[in-house]
Amino acid sequence: MNTDLEEQEDELLALQSIFDSEEFVRDESKSAGEIRVSVELPADFNVVLKEGDSLRQYEISFLPPLLLTFDLPQDYPSSSPPSFTLTCSWLTHPQVRSLVGEELFSRYDRLLLQSTLDHMADVTYCPRNSCGSAVIVDTSSTAAMCSVCNFAFCVKCKKTYHGAQDCHTMKTEKEDIIPQRGYASLPQSKEGLKAVWDDYSSASKERKRILERRYGRDVMQGTLTMWLSDDWITDNCKHCPHCFCKIQKISGCNVMTCTRCHQLFCWACLTRLEKYGSDHFQSSDCVHYPLDFAYRA
């Protein structure tokens, strides 16, 4: 046995003496093995990620075990360094299903698929609020077509497809509400737009035809509803402080629970809350029950 192999054997024996059989597994067929590391996080552990010009902070309570796999080449340590692979794996699908039950597993499976799709460069989502289906896109083109609702949109700005015209120009047109060629201009205010839409949505067939001849059928049936939806979401929704999904508050007190990640938070200031009976409302300017909430004991 040469000097390298002797030193490798000494190191492997040292690892076996330091770690128990659940933490260190030696590969007897060669100078290699695996070390399983359980991670214990301190309280209030946060990870901050930079996305463009903004920073997003995520609170992490648990991490799955880390698996360090190593292989010692024949000329280690005299010439070559060891090779390492660090992986982080968790429960298998059958294990998750057996632990949480069918209903919760179905939700987990759906969210896992959504997360996978979110990381695929050739997949986006239909921007229509009533649809939201996954759409496969051609990465060489800015055009996409939803196979479910047949909505054609720009993959960059998520608005109705506008051909070669750039998205910044389209944004200006949205703000100024430029009419289709040959049709009348829509009102410039949100209130005026809503009045036109209310008239159209509750009108008789004849009245709808009149409005379509005045403003254009495409504007009345597609573009106008999209503008109003975007404005409504901006005015009525906030982002969860944990997972940043959009949330609408219909009624109730200012303690909100995100339906996606189940984070408790204050609707007024978006502070995360540890539990429902938090002292946040005693130590801040936020109120637990807003004036429009009729509390019933």
Image (cartoon, rainbow, N blue to C red):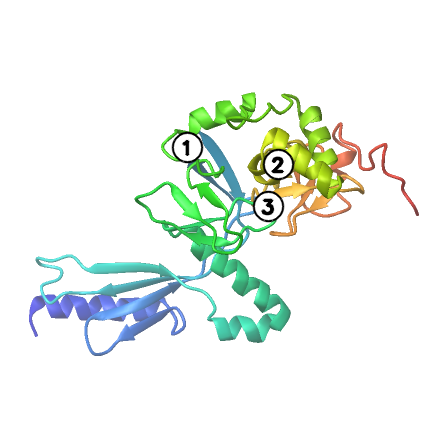
Rendered residue at 43%/57% (across/down): 116
Lower position in the chain sequence, tag 3 or tag 1: 1
Q: Nearer the viewer, mark 3 or mark 2?
A: 2
Query: Residue at image x 45%, y 52%?
Result: 135
| Spot occupied by residue 185 in the image (x, y as percentages of width and height) | 59, 23
Q: What residue sits right under mark 1 in the picture? A: 52
As drawn, 62 above or below 283: below
Could you tell me if residue 270 is visible in this image? no
For badge 3, the amino acid type reads Asn
Residue 194's place in the image compared with 188, above or below, is below
For marks 2 and 1 on the same chain, the one whose residue lies earlier in the sequence: 1
Above/below status of 144 relative to 106: above
Residue 157 against residue 42 in the figure, above or below: above
Residue underneath mark 2 = 220
Amino acid type assigned to the residue bearing label 2 in the image: Met
Query: As shown in the figure, which amino acid type bears the numbered disc 1?
Result: Gly
Q: Nearer the viewer, residue 112 or 282?
A: 112
Residue toward you, 297 or 188 = 188
**Which of the marked residues, 3 or 2, is nearer the chain's N terminus?**
3
Question: Could you tell me how far apart the alpha carbons at marks 2 and 1 are, in whole angstroms?
Answer: 36 Å
**Disc 3: which residue:** 129
Residue 161's tag is none
**Residue 157 percent coordinates (x, y):** 45, 35
Gap in Å between the C-alphas at discs 3 and 1?
25 Å
Circle 3/circle 2 CB separation < 8 Å: no
Q: Percent from the top left, x then y, of residue 192?
A: 70, 24
In the picture provided, is 159 more to the left or to the right than 86?
right
- How crowded pointer 1 is (Cα within 10 Å; few <14, some 14-19, many 20+) is rated as few
